[in-house]
Image: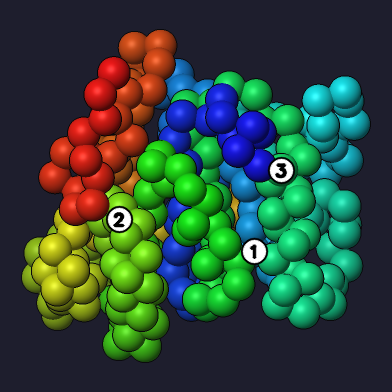
Amino acid sequence: MKKRLKPVKAILLVLSGKGGVGKSVVSATFAAILSGSGLRVGLMDADIYGPSSALLFGAHELPAEGAEGLTPPVRGGVKVMSVDLFAKGKPIPLTGSAAQQVVLELLALTDWGELDCLIVDMPPATGDIMLSLTSLGKKEVAAVVVTMPDRLSVTVAHRVLQLLKSGRVPTIGVLGNMLRHSRAGGANEGSGPRKLAREFSVPLLGLLPYDGGVTRAVERSDIGALMGTRFAEQLRLSMRPFIASLGAGKGRARRVVPRHVPGMARRPR
């Protein structure tokens, strides 16, 4: 595993703890944003029970087998790996420990090559897969937590942040998603994500709007249309510090997370 991930400069775990908050769409859109910024990007779908990354990118072919491992399909400059490329829409009835093993093996068998960032679309809940992937033993692993503004989503996201804190996983911040009013005001919709960020002393990266254009793009597996939505533009603005930390447009990745993120010390170069 360590040898396989050695050429990967940064790993970003996208978590929510709860399904249905738009975590997978955030992961896929952000992967496309990074690729469009000139960075080398991979997207690993670790949500083994409800994989969707391949669908979002319109990737259907089996990964090619080579001397260095499995070569993931590439869409829009993003290397996409998902168990659904093998399952083809069929359910995957696995226990927690078995699912964990499948994800780790798929991660290790994939020939990612040199990447500036590997985005991992994490499964809901705080089980075996999350515990394994947050303890990969790489300083370059960081996390972002996605939540909707409702009380249930925020409560579950709170548990995820607690676990990240106890595991000393650097958290670049909280993203509020699917807000009807993404700016200040609007029935104070953003109060839940803001409170989470304050409590855990991490940045509130942004409040992403509910955007019907996202649904239409997802229905067509049209990543280009997805990139043209208000949602994608707001996500780009929200993640500017992280994009800059990867050295977008400068040919190589630099720091993995901005300096103000707790738990991430400056690494000598």
Q: Amino acid at mark 3?
A: Ala
Q: Amino acid at mark 1?
A: Asp
| In the image: residue 259, left or right of residue 40 | left
Numbered label attached to residue 170? none
* Sooner in the amino-acid sequence: mark 2 or mark 1: 1
Q: Quadrant of the C terminus?
A: top left
Farthest residue to the top: give it.
251
Q: Determine the CA span between mark 1 and mark 3.
A: 16 Å
Task: Give the percent coordinates (x, y) of residue 3.
Answer: 64, 32
Circles 2 and 3, Cβ within 8 Å, touching? The answer is: no
Q: Dot 2: within a 10 Å radius of its alpha carbon, few (fewer than 14), some, or many (20 or more) residues?
A: many
Q: Residue at x 36, y 80 (%)?
A: 159
Q: Residue at x 37, y 65 (%)?
A: 167
Element type where label 1 sits in the image:
loop
| In the image: residue 219, left or right of residue 211 | right
Numbered label attached to residue 47? 1
Instruction: Establish if 120 lies above or below 240.
Output: below
Q: Residue at x 60, y 66 (%)?
A: 129
| In the image: residue 259, left or right of residue 268 | left
Which of labels 2 and 3 is toward the front? 3
Q: Quadrant of residue 102?
A: bottom right
Which of labels 1 and 3 is toward the front? 3
Q: Determine the CA span between mark 2 and mark 1.
A: 20 Å
Reading the image, the residue beneath label 2 is: 171
Q: Residue at x 46, y 53 (%)?
A: 13
Task: Give the percent coordinates (x, y) of residue 64.
Answer: 88, 31
Task: Give the percent coordinates (x, y) of residue 218.
Answer: 61, 54
Q: Dot 3: within a 10 Å radius of its alpha carbon, few (fewer than 14), some, or many (20 or more) residues?
A: some
Reading the image, the residue beneath label 3 is: 108
Farthest residue to the bottom: give it.
152
Q: Amino acid at mark 2?
A: Thr
Q: For residue 191, say whether it is visible.
A: yes
